[in-house]
Amino acid sequence: MSKRMATQAPEATYRIDVAEAVRLIDEFMPTYGSQPVSLEDAAGCILRQTVTAERDQPPYDRVTMDGIAIDSAALAEGLREFTLAGNQAAGQAALRLPATNACIEIMTGAVLPIGTDTVIPVERIEHQADRVKLEAGYEAVPGQFIHARGSDHAKGLPLLDPGVRIRAPEMAILTAAGSATVTVAAWPKLAVISTGDELVEVGKPLEAHQIRSSNDHAIKAALRARGFQHCIRAHLPDEPQRLIQRIGELHEETDVLILSGGVSMGKYDYVPGVLEKLGVQLVFHKVLQRPGLPMWFGISQSGKPVFALPGNPVSTLVCVIRYVLPALLQAMGLRAEAVEHVVLGDAVEFKPDLSWFLPVKLDSGAGNPGAALPRPTNTSGDFISLGDSDGFVELQRGQDRYAAGLYVPFYRW
């Protein structure tokens, strides 16, 4: 269910700011459920449970250096030579020190032997048969090279909260917590639909007046890079009845529709009318931005979101990255993260009263490392130029010159 009840018809809005578009999408997005998965399958998922410590971490006084373990009382008595009383390896139960003048050879990661409280590094000792002698002039500190039990966290304390993406560190924490099964966000089923008679699938013969269908592949790649695997891809011609039939079918089969093309004001831009006939209620149409001004967003009668994006490739991609992906991830419970910001590397001018999604390349050279160097495309159809970019910055409307050094939001492809 969305934040606004599905039965409440939205009041259609036209030509809105970027911030208002984000707000409206958030207002109408549903909340997706959760599901248990094996730890093996949890990588890349969004956690939907609180994870607590199975036991103290570390669960025992852990040795952090190869060497010998001794009782520091011996040092206070002036002892510099010890009798070797055993060998304590990682994974073995703790040995017991038999006497103050004895020592136990110890390995990194092993449990600290009972009766010892100090570790002397192997580089600071000399073995003589069953005797171990400290290096001349070496002064040991009692309690050194011991990772104390519970010093990282105590048993029962929360380790991970709902809403985090399970990356390598989170996977290690889940493992240490003994979580064989993990509750994660359920991935919604998505349909990516490209429309247009001019589009031809890769591998099929191409006429001079046709182009390859690239938007659907690009959208799916962006989704898969963020973990979305349940994604149907379809290409539909500019035929109203065929659009109604197949979009209707895909709506029933999936949770979210993402369309590309057919949303502007042209004679063959059938998508808005088709969606209306299918009962999808318009939330907004047209955002004051470039590229991507004709973007369309609505909600179906069953509460499913529908993103209808402009067909020009650059417009499609920036809309997917700026709106679709964040909305989907937040609907799955991903904890809100601060938007990445960068410094604009060069001054740019932009006259229209629109927000500008400007492709940029992050400077990795010595001149201005980390700066975002503008890589404007020739048109919103010039997706080839995006190969020399890392993402885009958002330059807000209301001014026509943006100075070098300006701190601006950055969105990665």
Image (spheres, rainbow, N blue to C red):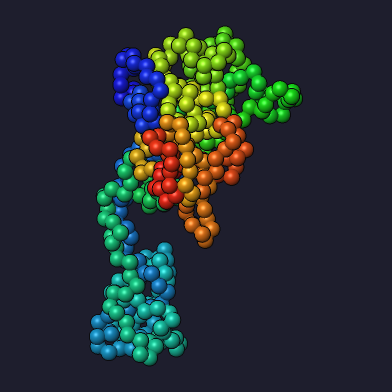
Residue 159 x %, y %: 31, 49
Vertical comparison of 279 with 203: above or below: above
Residue 185 appears in the rendering? no
**Residue at x 26% of width, y 50% of height:** 157
Query: For this rendering, which residue is in front, 373 or 238?
Result: 373
Location of residue 377 (image quadrant)? top right
Q: Would residue 89 be found to the left or right of residue 246 on screen? A: left
Query: For this rendering, which residue is in front, 98 or 206?
Result: 206
Q: How many marks?
A: 0
Query: For this rendering, which residue is in front, 349 or 391?
Result: 349
In the rendered image, the quadrant that contains the N terminus is top left
Residue 398 x %, y %: 38, 35
**Residue at x 43% of width, y 11% of height:** 279
Query: For this rendering, which residue is in front, 329 or 60?
Result: 329
Vertical comparison of 77 with 250: above or below: below
Residue 222 appears in the rendering? yes
Q: Would residue 389 be found to the left or right of residue 283 on screen? A: right
Residue 122 x %, y %: 43, 79
Residue 164 x %, y %: 37, 43
Q: Would residue 48 be found to the left or right of residue 412 on screen? A: left
**Residue at x 37% of width, y 19% of height:** 13
Vertical comparison of 340 with 89: above or below: above
Vertical comparison of 237 with 212: above or below: above
Location of residue 233 (image quadrant)? top right
Q: Would residue 73 be found to the left or right of residue 300 on screen? A: left
**Residue at x 35% of width, y 90% of height:** 137
